[in-house]
């Protein structure tokens, strides 16, 4: 039987403050959902689930100590300095 172990990873405080600061300029409130590490027991396989940030119904994915955010999936990335313009384009 395959046993999957999941451990929650708290979001880095600097990352959270950065996103909240940008959202203050856009008059929105972000919702943060912590990521996790999922590991298959008795193997060396593991997966790092990114943090999810929901802003105006749009899902953003982020990793701790990363310099970019991902929009919807891990193929569409934007830099933090582009986040304000991105959010304002959907308002």
Image: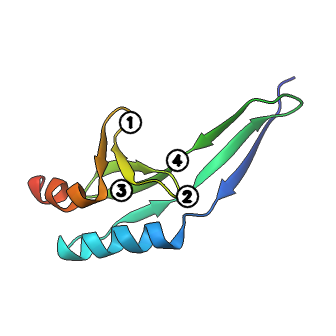
Give me the residue at 26% from left, 70% from top.
23
Bin the neighbour count of mark 1 within 10 Å (Cα to Cα): few under 14, some 14-19, many 20 and up: few
Sequence-first disc among 1 and 3: 3
Q: CA distance from mark 2 to mark 3?
A: 11 Å
Give me the residue at 24% from left, 76% from top.
24
Q: CA distance from mark 4 to mark 3?
A: 13 Å
List x then y, in percent, for residue 49: 57, 43
- The number of callouts visible is 4
Lateral position of residue 55 relative to residue 36, left or right: left
Lateral position of residue 80 relative to residue 10, left or right: left
Residue 54's mark? Answer: 3
**Residue at disc 4, secondary structure:** loop
Q: Which residue is identified by label 1?
A: 73
Label 4 or label 2, whichever lies nearer to me, is: 4
List x then y, in percent, for residue 73: 38, 36
| Relative vertical location of residue 14 with respect to residue 65 in this rendering, above or below | below
List x then y, in percent, for residue 67: 40, 54
Q: Quadrant of the C terminus?
A: bottom left
The image quadrant that residue 48 belongs to is: top right
Give me the residue at 37% from left, 51% from top.
68
Q: Which residue is identified by label 4?
A: 50
Lateral position of residue 43 relative to residue 15, left or right: right
Q: CA distance from mark 1 to mark 3?
A: 13 Å
Lateral position of residue 59 relative to residue 91, left or right: right
Q: CA distance from mark 1 to mark 2?
A: 16 Å
Residue 34's mark? Answer: 2
Farthest residue, direction top: 1
Sequence-first disc among 2 and 3: 2
Label 1 or label 3, whichever lies nearer to me, is: 1
């Amino acid at each position: 039987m395959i046993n999957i172990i999941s451990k929650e990873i708290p979001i880095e405080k600097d990352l959270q403050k950065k996103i909240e600061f940008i959202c203050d300029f856009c008059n929105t409130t972000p919702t943060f959902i912590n990521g996790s590490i999922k590991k298959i027991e008795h193997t060396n396989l593991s997966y790092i689930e990114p943090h999810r940030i929901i802003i105006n119904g749009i899902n953003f994915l982020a990793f701790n100590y990363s310099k970019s955010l991902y929009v919807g999936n891990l193929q569409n990335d934007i830099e933090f300095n582009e986040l304000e313009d991105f959010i304002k384009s959907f308002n």
